Amino acid sequence: MRDLNIPESRHPEKAHRKDNAQPKKPSWIRVKAPGGKGYAETHKIMRENNLVTVCEEAGCPNAGECWSQGHATMMIMGEICTRGCTFCNVATGKPDTLDAFEPGRVAHAVKKLGLNHVVITSVDRDDLKDGGAEHFAQTIRAVRHQSPDTTIEILTPDFLKCDDIVLETVVEARPDVFNHNLETVPGLYPEVRPGARYFHSLRLLQRVKELDPTMFTKSGIMVGLGEDRQSVMQIMDDMRAADIDFLTIGQYLQPTPKHHAVERFVHPDEFKDYETAAYGKGFLMVSATPLTRSSYHAGDDFAQLRAARLKKLGQA
């Protein structure tokens, strides 16, 4: 029986990889252990609705802070991914069939938590003809129905093996923010993200804007994987050429010895430098700190993102 709490069962594709030492984290990375009334209540709602969160599955360092405030990132379409990226702690293997009732349960949890802004992500589902696009759309519609004032941010897979038309299915459901992470610089894709293609992911985000120019687009990368400053600057330029509005940059943290090694811990001053450069290149919103993750403070960031667009339009 497969037990996803055991690393060998969770990541069978990494079982034969050599161990990489996990360096001690610097002071600016450490966070408080999760706990408290708010955390417990969020945990209860997630379990009552039989929901998966990326906060737990990916081992996010900010889970304690976010859950204590009643925020959680819903991960739909199961907890098993068809990809085996070397940075990721989500389990790899053959997923279960889609749960037709999941969109309703997500919508119920969003309403119960009273969320003003929700982030919905998923595992990769290369086993599905549409990559899960219709399931995303159904979930967006269900949340809209139960919580019409809640803004919705989605963090999607790349739909690499699907017909191009599936992207239209998701965009037509009208999420407020369409996020797809590039994760790292193109030179590291063969090692870090072997099942993906850099320019396909970039083009996906560009096509979202072509389908709906008013939709906010967002993408993020990790640093500390072995990239250099020049390659980070280049990825910023590539993103701006694709008209991406919002950039996130965070420190890569190694989940287990079998995962990709942390090459270095990037100092907060370097993150500040990246933030300054990104704003100079024209991003409407930038979050660049060691603990930045795609959905960290997403609600507050969305408010700033919307305000930045209005300001830009007012100056035009």
Image: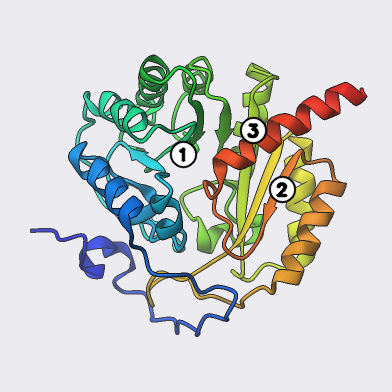
Q: Which residue is mark 1?
A: 157
**Which tag, 2 or 3, sits closer to the chain's start?**
3
Alpha-carbon span between mark 3 and mark 1? 14 Å
Residue kind at label 2, given as amino acid type: Val
Marks 2, 3: nearer the viewer: 2
Q: Residue furthest left?
A: 1
Alpha-carbon span between mark 2 and mark 3? 12 Å
Q: Residues within 10 Å of mark 2 (few under 14, many from 20)?
A: many
Q: Which residue is mark 2?
A: 286
The C terminus appears in which quarter of the rendering? top right
Q: Is residue 83 visible?
A: no
Q: Residue at x 63, y 17 (%)?
A: 211
Q: Which of these two is toward me, 46 or 82? A: 46
Q: Residue furthest right?
A: 316
Q: Are marks 2 and 3 in contact (CB under 8 Å)?
A: no
Q: State the image coordinates of residue 89 (x, y, percent, origin top left).
A: 37, 60
Q: Residues within 10 Å of mark 1 (few under 14, many from 20)?
A: many
Marks 3, 1: nearer the viewer: 3
Q: Which residue is mark 3?
A: 217
